[in-house]
Amino acid sequence: MRRARVRPAVLLVLAVASLLAFRLTGGPNTSADTSTSRPPEGVGQLAGEFRDGLRSHPADPTALRQLAQLISLEDRERGLAALSELAAAYPSDATVHSDLARAWYAAGDRARALAEARLALALDPSMPEALLLRGRLLASGEHPRIGQAERDWLRVVQVAPGTREAREAGELLRLYDGR
């Protein structure tokens, strides 16, 4: 009997889906309080799976992005490290840079968040997530650049009408109107 060969990317997607299902259901512990439940393998196992997946360098880094985001849920520092490694491995992937920008923003590092958002937009000038974040960063910085932020938010509304990002950009435009 011939054995089917499963590609590493497929295994990584299955692992991410399994871990997400585990986290969403609270795992085998079905008690009402799942706030402290974790996969038994923990964040170290996730990081190991991420490194293994990164070594296989799949053509599409989506599963690796999802795994890095799971790591971030458990450990911000390891998540930032995973996303940074991913950005280094996939320097021309705008979505990876946008994810890293949001992670730096969540960690409070505005300079790195802005740098990564700019990288994402250099690769994909119409990426709604990166436009929205860059606008937020420009509007709320030490020296606010409201006009440039408003241009980013208007672009979001134009390129992604009806999306969550467009609704948020519209709210920010109304909030900053006249400043």
Image (cartoon, rainbow, N blue to C red):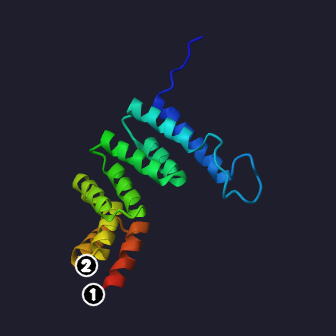
Residue 124 or 42: which is nearer the viewer?
Answer: 42
Q: x, y percentage for residue 114?
A: 28, 62
- Which part of the image, by quadrant, shows the C terminus? bottom left
Q: x, y percentage for residue 141?
A: 29, 74
Residue position marked by numbered label 2 in the rendering: 146
Disc 1 + disc 2, Cβ < 8 Å: yes
Instruction: Tell me if 72 is positioned left or right of 143 in this view.
Output: right
Residue 113: image quadrant is bottom left
Q: Secondary structure at mark 1?
A: loop
Which three-letter amino acid code belongs to the residue tagged 2? Ile
Measure the C-alpha gap from mark 1 to mark 2: 7 Å
Residue 93 or 41: which is nearer the viewer?
Answer: 41
Point out the tag, 1 or 2, that comes first from the N-terminus: 2
Q: x, y percentage for residue 105?
A: 38, 63
Q: Which residue is drawn at the image coordinates 30% and 86% (left, top)?
A: 177
Q: Is residue 151 above or below residue 117?
A: below
> Few, some or many C-alpha atoms within 10 Å of disc 1 (few <14, some 14-19, many ≥20)?
few
Residue position marked by numbered label 1 in the rendering: 179
Q: Which residue is drawn at the image coordinates 66% and 55% (left, top)?
A: 36
